[in-house]
Image (spheres, grey):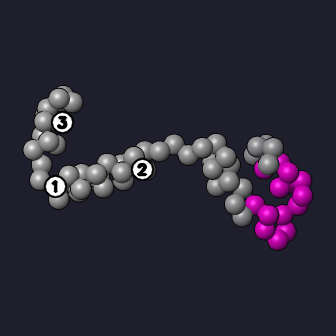
Amino acid sequence: MSTIAEIEDAIERLPAPQVEELIGWLEALRAKRAVPLPVESWLQRARGAAVPGATTAEVMALTRNDQ
């Protein structure tokens, strides 16, 4: 199977339980390939930055994306 038409044809012949399994697989693939929004990437980097001992300058540098 190498074309969309062949894949669609094969999917149409699947029994309902296998269609549900395919849907789950496709949703997992979509989630795995999803590119995080810029704010989500920033939050991942910033998480835990304001720990005891961190200076205000260090936290501000992180919020300005200086690091």
The label number, if any, that marks residue 16 in the structure image: 1
Q: Earlier in the sequence, mark 2 or mark 1?
A: 1
Q: Is residue 56 above or below residue 5?
A: below
Residue 43 lies, in percent from the top left, at 68, 54
Instruction: Give the alpha-carbon distance from disc 3 to disc 2, as whole Å.
Output: 22 Å
In the displayed structure, does residue 13 sit left or right of residue 29?
left
Residue 45 showing in the rendered view: no
In the displayed structure, does residue 50 sit left or right of residue 32?
right
Question: Residue at the bottom extreme?
Answer: 52
Comparing labels 2 and 1, the label whose residue is closer to the camera:
1
Q: Is residue 67 above or below residue 56?
A: above
**Residue wearing tag 3:** 8
**Residue wearing tag 2:** 32
Q: Earlier in the sequence, mark 3 or mark 1?
A: 3
Comparing labels 3 and 1, the label whose residue is closer to the camera:
1
* Region rendered in magenta: 49-62
Q: Amino acid at mark 3?
A: Glu
The label number, if any, that marks residue 25 in the structure image: none
The residue positioned 17% from the left and 59% from the top of the image is 17
In the displayed structure, does residue 14 sit left or right of residue 46?
left
Q: Amino acid at mark 2?
A: Lys
Of the pair 21 and 49, the residue shown nearer to us: 21
Instruction: Give the alpha-carbon distance from disc 2 to disc 1, as whole Å.
Output: 24 Å
Q: Amino acid at mark 1?
A: Ala
SS category of the residue bearing label 2 = helix
Q: Earlier in the sequence, mark 3 or mark 2?
A: 3
